[in-house]
Image: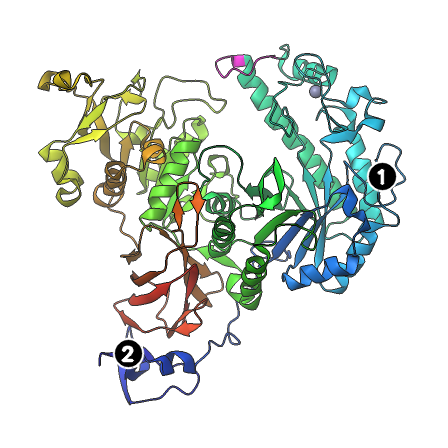
């Protein structure tokens, strides 16, 4: 029988033989027992009593382990059984409940003349719910939606309303769209908030859909609001007449986009300040980073033919955790199938994966249902919700005061490029943080830029001189940069500058843009293979490149790799060939040393390509650039299936660390089925300190490991839907 070693755990482990060793300078006692011994694995249970995770700050929401359930109540829910509602939240282990308080419908007896009172309500729904939930220790966030007003009130105040480019208001099911620059959103919203906050002991405020909404729930777009308030305010602040068309080539439209951002943020900040003045303990939540404590985002399906974004929740929570030390991610799993199908759930397997992404990236949990957990007609996911939330509650300490352990940061650029790079990093188990470009250099990021060994700039095309200077300085001081796409070629508002404004990349600022064309390739020479890695490039000497491309000239000692081969003939087959003369001298990759640091420029949209086709060549090039050219070596190595998403999270108080594993398998086309069990995943990693025990928290058992020279090696015997490999020091 195979013999393995395990470090002593609490409980009656059957000891066959004891010996002592010195590992990493620490005296330890080892217990020897037969491998695969169920006795050894079942005898002990993890004891977390001695663990003190500490706390992040004095707030109750920041880097804190809460579980939110948002019930988007219909008017008709006003007659609900409040006790049953409260019990359903206790059954779900919810620690925060988000309920509709006011705006579109007031679920309390409002005294304000322009606040529409729920006609289905007999008493005081908000008052009863808060009383019941608080009695069970559950916090309550009040939801307000100021984007629309009931038609019975709207036309008495037409100056509050949105006006389409056709000169019309929008009335959707009796709710009329309001304009952000009108008096309802600017002033009356504050009266409503004042009344609700004065009347009820709420714990937080969420406001929905404030801002420049141009579409209705059916997806019709009515264009840029043309109301008198918008016209006047835009003219006063820019000197221009309001644009009518949404056209990024129009400089006035680009100015309008900046105007939208600054005016929305001004209102968010004002409302945020008002709420804090009324009650400083209230937590503020909406879909903005301005004026809030929790940044709302959603992971949900829709009716589009494209497959869902598998890493949606990963994306949403990591970009908040990586960018803002004073903001909590409030990512919500939208349980319904689509906006047009509110009463049935999405795939329960996808729903679980998205909730797990929140949890195993160290973010709080969020779940949205239309109606209540009591009366929702599709019950299939409710047991899974209760089970996952229950797991989170049971091990709450392990989700407290966390920080991802990553030495690479992905700076968020254009959507497809960004998503493609997230796919590669996740499939390759390369751990990374995500940072919003606007947060860099503001002092708001949880970690300093120089704490990262490498930055990935994934087509961060819009960039001001300030950020470009910060990146150049980072490389000069020893940082590593992998830049893809058209990074730093436009100003912050999106105006093309026709030059690459990062000096560190080893190319002349001027470039010529080649527009995407079929049958364009990159040629790979033997020299290129020697630089990029013989093993990974042994099977091919040409690479697909279906993207715009910057024809760049290298400067100094920068090294160009691969050669641009544009628009070769692809039909008929007899004519499908190219000659040496067709191969240009423009490089498909530029490697450079700058100051104490190094850079790689890939002057085309590699991430977008991977997002499109998931092609192995693009993945191999990306990994080669990171590991062979920039020499960024991972702290976690594994033979895990690419379908396992892994995370590496540490406690900021130094009490523990864990590796999260999400089994993303089970998808074929649009079908999202149960994940396939994955056996014998080997993991080798470098913990922050020597470890004494390793536990699989979901499987509920300790596992064997080897530890030497600061590295730990172990095997995860089987991964069903997810697990957490907990390291105790
Ligand atoms: Zn307007």
| Residue 248 falls inside the magenta stretch | yes
Front position in the image: 88 or 245: 88
Instruction: Name the residue: 48% across, 25% down.
Output: 492
Q: Measured from the top left, where is residue 159 in percent x and y?
A: 79, 19
Q: Residue at x 25, y 42 (%)?
A: 630
Report which quarter residue 342 is drawn in: top right
Can you say whether 526 is above or below 433 in the image? above
Instruction: State the residue position of label 2.
Output: 35
Q: Look at the image and tell me whether residue 601 can be seen.
A: yes
**Is 554 or 16 nearer to us in this picture?**
16
User: Crowding at label 1, few (<14), some or many (≥20) Cα neighbours within 10 Å?
Assistant: many
| Mark earlier in primary sequence (1, 2) | 2
Q: Which residues are magenta?
A: 243-251
User: For the residue with label 1, is its CB less than 8 Å from the closest atom of ligand 1?
Assistant: no
Q: In screen coordinates, is 136 left or right of 6?
A: right
Residue 562 left/right relative to 92:
left
Q: Secondary structure at mark 2?
A: loop
User: What kind of secondary structure does the magenta stretch mostly adopt?
Assistant: loop
In the image, residue 473 sits, relative to residue 432, either above or below, namely above
Quadrant of picture, ligand 1: top right
Residue 389 image position (x, y, % from top left): 57, 60
Q: Quadrant of the image for the N terminus?
A: bottom left
The foreground one among 116 and 629 is: 116
Location of residue 513 (image quadrant): top left
Q: Which mark, residue 117?
A: 1
């Amino acid at each position: 029988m195979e013999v393995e070693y395990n470090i002593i755990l609490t409980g009656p482990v059957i000891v066959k033989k004891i010996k002592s060793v010195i590992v990493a300078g620490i005296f330890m006692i080892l217990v020897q027992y037969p491998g695969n011994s169920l006795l050894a694995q079942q005898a002990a249970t993890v004891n977390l009593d001695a663990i003190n995770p500490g706390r992040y700050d004095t707030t109750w929401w920041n880097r804190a382990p809460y579980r939110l359930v948002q019930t988007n109540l219909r008017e008709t829910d006003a007659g609900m059984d409040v006790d049953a509602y409260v019990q359903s939240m206790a059954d779900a282990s919810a620690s925060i409940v988000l309920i509709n308080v006011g705006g579109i419908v007031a679920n309390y007896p409002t005294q304000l003349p322009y606040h529409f009172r729920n006609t289905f309500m007999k008493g005081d729904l908000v008052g009863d719910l808060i009383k019941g939930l608080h009695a069970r220790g559950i916090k309550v966030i009040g939801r307000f939606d100021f984007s629309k007003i009931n038609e019975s009130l709207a036309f008495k105040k037409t100056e509050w309303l949105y006006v389409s480019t056709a000169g019309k208001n929008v009335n959707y099911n009796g709710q009329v769209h309001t304009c952000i620059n009108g008096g309802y959103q600017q002033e009356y919203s504050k009266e409503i908030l004042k009344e609700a906050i004065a009347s009820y002991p709420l714990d937080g405020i969420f406001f929905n859909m404030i801002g420049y909404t141009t579409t209705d729930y059916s997806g019709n777009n009515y264009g840029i609001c043309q109301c008198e308030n918008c016209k006047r305010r835009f003219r006063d602040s820019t000197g221009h007449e309001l644009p009518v068309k949404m056209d990024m080539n129009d400089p006035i439209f680009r100015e309008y986009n900046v105007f939208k951002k600054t005016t929305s943020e001004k209102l968010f900040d004002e409302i945020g300040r008002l709420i804090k003045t009324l009650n400083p303990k209230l937590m503020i939540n909406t879909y903005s980073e301005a004026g809030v404590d929790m940044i709302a985002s959603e992971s949900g399906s829709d009716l589009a033919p494209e497959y869902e974004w598998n890493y949606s929740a990963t994306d949403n929570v990591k970009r908040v955790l990586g960018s803002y030390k004073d903001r909590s991610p409030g990512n919500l799993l939208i349980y319904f199938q689509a906006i047009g199908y509110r009463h049935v759930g999405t795939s329960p397997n996808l729903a679980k994966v998205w909730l797990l992404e929140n949890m195993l990236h160290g973010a709080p949990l969020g779940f949205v249902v239309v109606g209540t957990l009591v009366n929702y007609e599709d019950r299939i996911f409710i047991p899974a919700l209760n089970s996952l939330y229950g797991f989170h509650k049971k091990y709450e300490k392990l989700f407290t005061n966390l920080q991802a352990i990553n030495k690479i940061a992905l700076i968020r650029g254009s959507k497809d490029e960004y998503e493609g790079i997230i796919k590669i990093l996740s499939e390759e188990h390369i751990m990374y943080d995500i940072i919003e470009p606007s947060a860099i250099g503001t002092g708001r990021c949880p970690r300093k830029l120089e704490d990262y060994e490498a930055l990935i700039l994934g087509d961060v095309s819009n960039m001001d001189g300030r950020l470009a200077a910060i990146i150049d300085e980072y490389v000069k001081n020893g940082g590593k940069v992998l830049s893809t796409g058209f990074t730093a070629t436009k100003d912050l508002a999106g105006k093309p500058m026709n030059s690459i404004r990062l000096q560190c990349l080893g190319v002349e600022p001027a470039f010529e843009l080649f527009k995407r064309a079929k049958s364009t390739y990159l040629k790979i020479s033997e020299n290129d293979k020697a630089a990029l890695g013989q093993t990974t490039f042994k099977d091919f000497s040409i690479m697909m490149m279906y993207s715009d491309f910057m024809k760049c000239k290298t400067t100094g000692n920068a090294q160009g790799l691969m050669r641009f081969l544009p628009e070769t003939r692809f039909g008929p087959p007899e004519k499908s060939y190219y000659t040496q003369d067709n191969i240009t001298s423009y490089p498909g990759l530029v490697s450079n040393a700058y100051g104490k640091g190094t850079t790689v420029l890939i002057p085309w949209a590699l991430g977008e390509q991977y997002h499109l086709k998931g092609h192995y060549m693009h993945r191999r090039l990306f990994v080669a650039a990171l590991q062979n050219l920039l020499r960024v070596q991972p702290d976690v190595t594994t033979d895990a299936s690419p379908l396992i998403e892994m995370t590496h999270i540490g406690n900021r108080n130094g009490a523990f660390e864990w590796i999260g594993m999400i089994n993303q398998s089970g998808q074929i086309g649009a079908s999202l089925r149960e994940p396939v069990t994955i056996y014998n995943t080997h993991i080798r990693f470098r913990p922050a300190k020597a470890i004494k025990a390793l536990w699989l928290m979901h499987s509920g058992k300790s596992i064997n490991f080897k530890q030497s020279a600061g590295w730990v090696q172990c095997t995860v015997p089987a991964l069903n839907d997810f697990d957490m490999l907990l390291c105790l020091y």
